[in-house]
């Protein structure tokens, strides 16, 4: 089978719609399929090797201010997608479109013109922020309707799409896969991971997320002073890059907790797995999530999660029970209280959570589910 993934991101970008097409491509190649990509250049340079050849489409948002703020930039980028992407799409048996945006929506239209079966995967903000345009064609809704199959990152996301009038007969909910590098660790494994990372504090909290307002790391920093009153030997490690780095650093210093917080920057997945294994808790105060891959990765390492009551946080809480504690969004007092209780308990995740990860969320399982969808689209 020849599969073409159309996605705005690829690694080393850490976005969900970079990691899923990358992992699915790697799994498909191992299974004997041929994989190609149509994507924008990664925002972060790096020496990544992709599972198949990539056709790079310059983003109109990076063409300069004048092009970015006029329709001409979008027209140029759309023309690029058609001119450069059409040959890749023509070669494919199935086209897998990831998320929304000009690249994916025009790519989906090209696939439709060429009568190619199309799978559309939606991640979160593509649905949460959807508003039908009034003065231009709704390319996103068209891609949604014309897709052979639509997959969602969570049940809540699919429900929201239905509320917005985005209807489709063929839909599935497929949670993101958890890479094999995220493996369950006992307390002995946790101690070993801390030794390898040079972590010496009694309590370790980890957050992995782009430093963006929706990720709400500010709530976690605001919770630190109260937490440190009862648990003074606590170390918070924030993995990720983004526009709020300087602001969050200033917040931590102003709150007097700067020496307890490490901003580790953008780190590779192997190091993220080490941090997750070393942590007492993975803390994710995001105000908007569909299904946070980073939380699943932490659970796979045996680390309980404290998260906010975003749709994805609530859904994970219902699925994983006591291993995912849910608190009100942007409530630092509630967050500090929940962290305090969990630190006092000092435990790893339950056998039930480990079984769910292994039986439902490993790449081999998720890859096989997508493969069955591709085959059904071709039938």
Image (cartoon, helix red, strand yellow):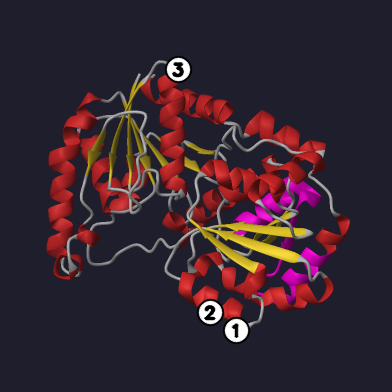
What is the spatial separation of the Cα atoms under label 1 and label 2, in whole angstroms? 6 Å
**Residue 325: image tag:** none
**Residue 31: image tag:** 3
Which label lies toward us, 3 or 1? 1
Q: Could you tell me which secondary element the residue under label 2 belongs to?
A: helix
Q: Quadrant of the C terminus?
A: top left
Taking the image as drawn, is residue 277 in sight?
A: no
The tag earlier along the polypeptide, 3 or 1, is 3
Name the residue located 39 percent from the left edge and 26 percent from the top edge.
377
Residue 131: x and y in percent read: 38, 64
Q: Which region shows up in magenta?
A: 311-340
| 339 over 273 or under it: above or below | below
Q: Nearer the viewer, residue 201 or 113?
A: 201
Name the residue located 68 percent from the left edge and 57 percent from the top edge.
314
Q: Is residue 240 left or right of residue 119?
A: right
**Do the numbered discs 1 and 2 sit on residues whose CB atoms are within 8 Å?**
yes
Residue bearing the label numbered 2: 250
Residue 199: x and y in percent read: 69, 55
Name the residue located 53 percent from the left edge and 79 percent from the top edge.
250
Q: Is residue 42 left or right of residue 19?
A: left
The reply to whether the magenta stretch includes residue 316 is: yes
Q: How many marks?
A: 3
Q: Could you tell me which secondary element the residue under label 1 belongs to?
A: helix
**Residue 254: image tag:** 1
């Amino acid at each position: 089978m020849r599969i073409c993934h159309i996605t705005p991101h690829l690694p080393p970008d850490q976005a969900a719609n970079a990691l899923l097409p990358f992992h699915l491509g790697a799994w498909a190649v191992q299974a004997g399929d041929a994989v190609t990509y149509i994507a924008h250049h990664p925002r972060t340079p790096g020496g990544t090797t992709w599972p198949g050849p990539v056709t790079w489409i310059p983003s109109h948002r990076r063409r300069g201010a004048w092009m970015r703020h006029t329709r001409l930039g979008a027209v140029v980028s759309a023309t690029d997608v058609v001119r450069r992407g059409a040959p890749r799409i023509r070669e494919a048996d199935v086209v897998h479109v990831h998320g929304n945006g000009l690249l994916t929506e025009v790519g989906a239209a090209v696939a439709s013109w060429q009568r190619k079966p199309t799978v559309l995967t939606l991640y979160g903000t593509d649905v949460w922020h959807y508003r039908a345009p009034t003065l231009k064609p709704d390319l996103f809704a068209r891609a949604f309707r014309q897709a052979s199959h639509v997959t969602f990152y969570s049940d809540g996301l699919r429900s929201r799409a239905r509320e917005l009038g985005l209807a489709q007969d063929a839909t599935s909910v497929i949670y993101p896969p958890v890479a094999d590098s995220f493996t369950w660790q006992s307390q002995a494994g946790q101690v070993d991971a801390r030794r390898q990372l040079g972590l010496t504090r009694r309590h370790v909290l980890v957050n992995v997320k782009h430093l963006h307002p929706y990720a709400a790391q500010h709530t976690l920093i605001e919770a630190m002073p109260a937490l440190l009153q009862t648990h003074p030997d606590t170390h918070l490690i924030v993995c990720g890059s983004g526009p709020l780095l300087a602001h969050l650093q200033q917040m931590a210093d102003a709150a007097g907790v700067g020496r307890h917080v490490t901003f580790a920057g953008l780190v590779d997945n192997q190091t993220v797995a080490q941090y997750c294994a070393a942590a007492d808790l993975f803390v994710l105060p995001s105000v908007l999530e569909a299904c946070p891959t980073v939380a699943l990765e932490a659970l796979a390492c045996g680390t309980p999660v404290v998260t906010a009551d975003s749709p994805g946080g609530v859904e994970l809480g219902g699925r994983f029970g006591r291993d995912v504690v849910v608190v009100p969004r942007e409530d630092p007092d509630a967050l500090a209280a929940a962290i305090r209780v969990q630190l006092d308990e000092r435990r790893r995740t339950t056998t039930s959570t480990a079984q769910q990860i292994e039986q439902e969320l490993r790449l081999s399982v998720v890859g096989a589910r997508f493969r069955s969808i591709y085959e059904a689209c071709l039938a």
